[in-house]
Image (cartoon, rainbow, N blue to C red):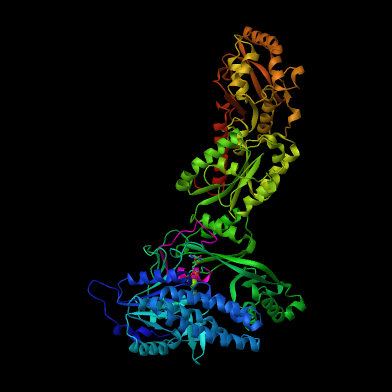
Amino acid sequence: MSSPAAAFPLSQAAPVATADAVPRTVVHKFGGTSVADAERYRHVAQLLLQRREAEQVSVVSAMKGVTDSLIDLARLAAEGASHWRDAWHALRARHRGAAVALLAEDAGEGVEWLDAQFDELLLVLEALAVIGGLPREVLDRVQGLGEVCSAFLLGQHLLALGEACAVLDAREVLVVDHGELGVTVDWALSAQRLQQWRRNNPQPRVVVTGFIARDRQGRITTLGRNGSDYSGAIFAALFNAEELQIWTDVDGVLSADPRLVPEAVQLEALSYDEACELAYFGAKVVHPQTMSPAIERGLPILIRNTFQPAHPGTRITAQRSIRGPIKGLTLSPELAVVNLEGTGLIGVPGTAERVFSALRQAHVSVVMISQGSSEHSICCVVRGNDAAQARDALLRAFAGELAAGQVQRVHVTDNVSVLAAVGDGMAGQPGVAARLFEALGRARVNILAIAQGSSERNISVAIRSEDATRALRAAHAGFWLSPQTFAVGVIGPGNVGAALLDQLQAAQPALLARANIDLRLRAVASRGGMHLAPRAVQGDWRSALAAQHETSDLDRFTAHLQAAHLPHAVVIDCSGSAEVAERYAGWLAAGIHVVTPNKQAGSGPWERYQQIRSAALASGARFRYEATVGAGLPVITTLRDLVDTGDEVLAIEGIFSGTLAWLFNRFDGSQPFSALVAQARALGYTEPDPRDDLSGVDVARKLVILAREAGRALSLPEVQVESLVPEALRDGDVETFMGALEQGDAALLQRLQRARERGAVLRYVAALTADGASVGLAEVPATHAFANLQLTDNVVQFRTRRYCDNPLVVQGPGAGPEVTAAGVFADLLRVAAGEGARL
Ligand code: ADP
Ligand code: ASP
Ligand code: MG
């Protein structure tokens, strides 16, 4: 391919740049999104007029959606569908409307010109209806009409504004060939024709039709769907432009398709190589062939936003700007994996050649190839539509080997997408593939095949299409191109749940800004109803929950959390309900993390506990429940660290109830115990029914949780529990109970006095030793740590092989919604950190 610009220096005919560096020639390409209606043409014209360029060439696409409509129209007519005329009328009306709005007093002539085009189209369509088929050449003629009308509208509008402007129908100059490797340009012929055309049309502004051209036989053709970008690059070469600016509806090339990854970031600069990889693998923003005319000439391409003309956009040049290992990710949908497998392939030269020539003969293009060094199988990714053909071609080509049992099978997996990570920065840098695979693994995406070229600019993986969006988002977050996002659902906005939701909403912006993690609250379920937010709960969660009218349903709640295609989902159960705990194993098996202050699962039936643990182990999802013991205190974390580092727990002792701690800290005989219970209740230190605290069951549950964490298969019925609720008062309503509680005062006072005589105090203590587990009142020496607690403080002592003389003690406030919620929140952050968030 020779350079047309060198051979035919066309632009020298145009005005030459002046001293204050007005660019000589700039080619602008406006996509369909930039010229959707009259208003947008006006906007584009203003944008052009504001630019000081000696020669200004605008290549335009059809109005948004028009090419699709024209193709539909041709198909409908060819199929003999009755309503094609209505569609034709609608399309003509859309163009007429734009002409009337744009062309002021010239509108009449404009509409006439457009009508002539549509009349001609009508004739073609009628002919199609008669012949009942759609020959390729006719389709090419029909589908290019949108560009013809579009260039006319913009050109006439500029003229109506008093600008000297010429409209170039690319079919007059652009000659192309359709080869196996796509469309190639006859540069010499095209340049010569353009030179001729320019002699008769020397205006400084030119509007050119994108997409369309002629072949060497003079037949109308196109450059393929989305081909106007390529037209832009071709005309930039033919006009010897200094720059090609591609105007679209986004701020440039983004790190991923913004429709799939809303957090995608704009890329300031790309090398041609990177842009080729991104474009080739499906980033729709630039057509893949656009780059080749630019590369040859070192022509910079800018991708810019028509709606934000001040934004600098993305600059694509030969220069490499390396920022991080990858620049962007692309996703190609609607593919299939074809796998040829056989022991007879091992070490046999020429197998690959036979596979590819069979596919070539069947006109199947291969998107991705992968073969392991065992040579036992060879795997190709092809377009979904070609899969059956590809399989048949291979079955034919290897029929002999299949019959002889040397090839075992040719297998097709449909509904496949290819995810590709692209960037010059990955060359020679270890760990890039690992990061991609880790992100996909964490998002539970199975990889079907892998390919990386030795240019190390692209790592591609074939995955199932149903996983594609989640995979793309996970990889995008995994490379820190966007925040690590978690879909969070909270059940039970009671005291702790409400405090947690408040903390979550308050901390969310700072976590996003500082640590790049997005804890996105998507669902809140209470007994009275639930709120499922389309994206995230907006504003205060209380009003959102109050405004909903949906009854709570945990199936829908779960489906909603998963539907977001976010890489990670977390359920936070603040309900205290055993029914919700029944769901944990299912959630964990589905990869949803579970965080909870609810003691039901940790202290409930051993079998369920085991199911929950194994579900978590199998899926890698985490089950965290730090706040079940000691509220926000790091009790379970400490115990885990001890066990994980190989220590052996000999005994655990402590005061695990803030309520009972407070009561016995205050119980000095100066007032009856029942009066203290009434006070604690009034202060909100007890459960609504203080028997829940006084029965000791809650403490026993905490002891079970710790025992299991320490490796003991303990269950609740095995714990010896001393209840402080007199036998006769166990049933009946709360108020009756409170009224009668003084019945037990005398006995408790007596125990206190006996303890004192021995220089001790009374404390409600939980103990796990080699001999068993018990919770109940104990006499504690007045000098003992347990005898000197403040207010509602909890204390836990771990006696282990390493901490044997002097136990490890965790102590501090162990009750209250705020600190408990903070414990839950900390668990959530640990889950996030476990998923790679950098906190
Ligand atoms: P035009 O009509 O201007 O040619 P297109 O619709 O062909 O516009 O291409 C622009 C669209 O490409 C954007 O609106 C965006 O949704 C999509 N797109 C896909 N991948 C990317 C990406 N990586 N960067 C930017 N845009 C992308
Ligand atoms: N109008 C053509 C299409 O929709 C070309 C383009 O817009 O790039 O494919
Ligand atoms: Mg496009």
Q: Quadrant of residue 244?
A: bottom left
Q: Quadrant of the N terminus?
A: bottom left
Which span of residues is magenta-colored?
Answer: 258-282
Asked whether 125 or 526 is in front, the reply is 125
Confirm whether residue 291 shows in the render: no
Image: 164 above or below 436: below
| Picture residue at 59% right of the left edge, 37% below the top | 497
The one nearer the camera, 490 or 172, is 172
Location of residue 70 by image quarter: bottom right
Q: Does residue 646 appear left or right of residue 110 in this picture?
A: right
Check the image and report above or below for 433 versus 340: above
262 magenta-colored: yes
- Locate residue 498, reporting x and y percent: 58, 36
**Image x and y of residue 53, in percent:** 31, 74
- Quarter of image, res 623: top right
x, y percent for residue 723 = 72, 20
Direction from residue 195 to residue 696 in the image, left or right: right
Q: Nearer the viewer, residue 46 or 388?
A: 46
Q: As drawn, is 227 to the left or to the right of 17?
A: right
Q: Position of residue 761 (x, y in %)?
A: 61, 13
Query: Any magenta on residue 98?
Result: no
